[in-house]
Image (cartoon, rainbow, N blue to C red):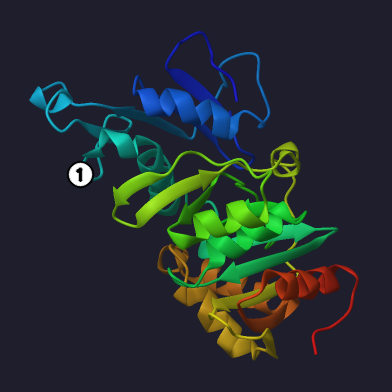
């Protein structure tokens, strides 16, 4: 990340894409450099920028009475403003929207992704399944984060492109992960959002250092957090894994046959499982076993 000569403009090179963010909002200026400081620094403004984003307060009485923040992509506001205290998660959610709706070079899955020693796992799951919490825990355990929200696969090669941005943690998962990983770096908590209490976890240095290194997916694991449940791992039929993937895709319908063929090749290549868990020590043992070649029982 670099500030190219302006107090309120930053350029992020996060592997598969480049983002320009401009904002005079105090929370943005405080937390965005903190969250992205480990990513590659460039000495000049990039030649090409995928998304030019601005987050700012409206030029009206709203600046003073219940102040709000607007998100703009190339001058267009795709959604309603949020309270200015939520400007940081607004930027992160808005960037997710940009990628899912504007960046169709890749096949997108609503999934987390992690990689270690050449083992790359896609974790497709609907909201509320605990995939972001699981991805954050695995990142702190030594896995490289590809994404906690959108896994991007290049259709012709089926290789996954990393966008290991800050992890969006919600509600109880914030204190849980802070307790388990006291060295993890998080923002303050942002209250009363549409998702409850939110905090963002800074990507590890390993994730940032390898922001441009793609990987071939080797496993598709559909996770589900169940309180007080022992670890349950079951082999998943390829058709079921295929449906889990495309059912959690943002642009499968847009790519058509290209997306269908890519998803078929991806599932055919990967080992596929479902995972129910509540204890991270058991999850870590399972994932570390994937790296050393042992198979789940």
Residue at the front extreme? 179
Q: At x 78% / y 54%, what residue is drawn?
A: 142
Q: At x 74% / y 70%, what residue is drawn?
A: 281
As displayed, is residue 190 above or below residue 265? above
Q: Position of residue 29 (x, y in %)?
A: 44, 23
Is residue 147 visible to the viewer in this orientation of the structure? Answer: no
Q: At x 19% / y 30%, what residue is drawn?
A: 67
Q: Quadrant of residue 156?
A: bottom right
Is residue 207 visible to the viewer in this orientation of the structure? Answer: yes
Q: Position of residue 209 (x, y in %)?
A: 75, 37
Q: Quadrant of residue 262?
A: bottom right
Q: Position of residue 81 (x, y in %)?
A: 22, 40
As displayed, is residue 94 above or below residue 74? below
Q: Quadrant of the C terminus?
A: bottom right
**Numbered marks: total:** 1
Disc 1 residue crowd, few under 14, some 14–19, many 20+, Cα 10 Å: few
Q: Quadrant of residue 78?
A: top left
Residue at the top extreme? 5
Q: Quadrant of the N terminus?
A: top right
Q: Secondary structure at mark 1?
A: loop
Is residue 150 toward the left or the right of residue 214 in the image? left
Judging depth in this view, the residue of 17 and 226 nearest the camera is 226
- Residue bearing mark 1: 80
Q: Position of residue 242 (x, y in %)?
A: 57, 81
């Amino acid at each position: 990340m670099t500030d190219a000569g302006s107090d309120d403009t930053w350029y992020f090179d996060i592997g598969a894409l480049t983002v320009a963010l401009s904002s005079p909002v105090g929370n943005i200026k405080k937390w965005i450099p903190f969250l992205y400081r480990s990513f590659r620094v460039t000495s000049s403004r990039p030649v090409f920028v995928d998304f030019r984003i601005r987050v700012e307060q409206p030029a009206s009485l709203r600046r003073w009475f219940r102040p709000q923040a607007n998100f703009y992509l190339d001058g267009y506001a795709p959604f309603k403003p949020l309270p200015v205290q939520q400007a940081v998660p607004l930027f992160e959610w808005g960037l997710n929207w940009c990628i899912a709706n504007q960046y169709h070079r890749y096949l997108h899955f609503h999934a987390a992704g992690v990689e270690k020693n050449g083992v790359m796992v896609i974790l497709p799951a609907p909201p509320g399944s605990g995939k972001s919490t699981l991805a954050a825990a695995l990142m702190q355990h030594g896995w490289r984060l590809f994404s906690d929200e959108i896994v991007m696969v290049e259709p012709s090669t089926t290789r996954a492109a990393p966008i290991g941005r800050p992890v969006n943690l919600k509600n109880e998962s914030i204190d849980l992960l802070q307790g388990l990983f006291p060295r993890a770096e998080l923002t303050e908590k942002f209250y009363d959002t549409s998702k409850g209490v939110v905090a963002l976890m800074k990507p590890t240095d390993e994730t940032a250092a390898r922001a441009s290194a793609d990987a071939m997916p080797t496993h598709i694991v559909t996770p589900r957090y169940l309180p007080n449940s022992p670890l349950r791992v079951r082999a998943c039929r390829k058709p079921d894994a295929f449906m889990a993937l495309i059912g959690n895709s943002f642009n499968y319908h847009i790519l058509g046959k290209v997306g269908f063929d890519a998803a078929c090749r991806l599932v055919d290549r990967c080992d596929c499982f479902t995972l129910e868990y509540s204890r991270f020590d058991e999850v870590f043992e399972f994932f570390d076993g994937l790296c050393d070649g042992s198979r789940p029982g």
